[in-house]
Every structure is written in C-alpha cells, then in structure tokens.
Amino acid sequence: MKYLAVGLAAVIGANLRYSITLLVAMLFTNDWLPFATFLANITGAFLLGFFIIYFARFIHKTWYISIRTGLIGSFTTFSAFSVEAMHLFQENHISLAFLYIFASVICSFFFAVFGMRIAKNKGELA
C-alpha cells in the first residue's frame, strides 16, 4: 500500500512541477534562466519544512511518507537544478551559474526553516 500511495503522490507532484514549468514559460521568455526549477525547489523546501513539523503528528504514516517522498519529492528536482547549473557554465554564464547555485541552496534552506517556524507557531496557537 505504501508503494502505491507514494507512486500516486509522485504523479501529482510531477504534474504540479510540470505546471510550474509551463506557467514560467508563459510569463518569462528567456530560456537560459532556470526560474521554474528554482521556484519549485524553494516552494518544495518551504512545504516540506512546514509539513514535517505541522502535519506529521496528525496523519497516518503511509500518507506522511507518500506526501513527503512522493508529492514533495517529485515536485522538487535536484537533478534538473544540477543540469541547469552545468548548462549555465557551458554557455559561459559563469556569474549567473554561481548565483543560481548559491541562491538555490541558501533560499531552499531558509524557506525550509521558514516553513518549520510557521508550522511550529501555528501548532502553538492551536
């Protein structure tokens, strides 16, 4: 049952990720700026930070694993981040590549912490 739940959640997460890619493509015309992956990763970091603090105590372990690993895991993408950073280096956008790497790692970390703090505060208010 856990494998099925993780798989179904992964389908949802991957489709949400693809939707962000389409939305960003409609809003921005420059294809060398990997904004869709950046947006998905920092959003996913926030959601995972919030989720592991707030919802973990309320839901069944199977749903916890499927949301954490399937939904949020397939929504975020370290592999695309890595390939896009390498592509920026190959296209000689060295400064942008370093900015993308630095911003992705730092922002994802802070968004995860931010999500955790909001969840903790929300739990204390309830």
Image (cartoon, rainbow, N blue to C red):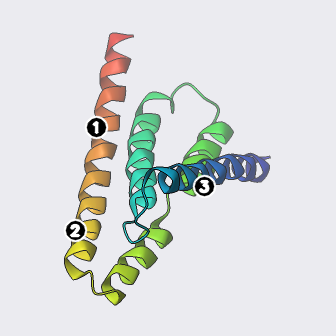
The local secondary structure at tag 2 comes to helix
Say whether residue 51 is left or right of residue 94. right
In the displayed structure, would residue 83 be above or below residue 103? below
Sooner in the amino-acid sequence: mark 3 or mark 1: 3
Say whether residue 104 is left or right of residue 11. left
Q: Which residue is mark 1?
A: 114
Q: Which residue is mark 2?
A: 99
Q: Quadrant of residue 104?
A: bottom left
How crowded pointer 3 is (Cα within 10 Å; few <14, some 14-19, many 20+) is rated as some
Label disc, if present, on residue 122 of the rendered structure: none
Q: Position of residue 55 (x, y in %)?
A: 50, 29
How crowded pointer 2 is (Cα within 10 Å; few <14, some 14-19, many 20+) is rated as few
Nearest to the observer: residue 48 or residue 57: 48
Q: Which residue is mark 3?
A: 18
In the displayed structure, would residue 57 be above or below residue 18? above
The local secondary structure at tag 3 comes to helix
Sooner in the amino-acid sequence: mark 2 or mark 1: 2
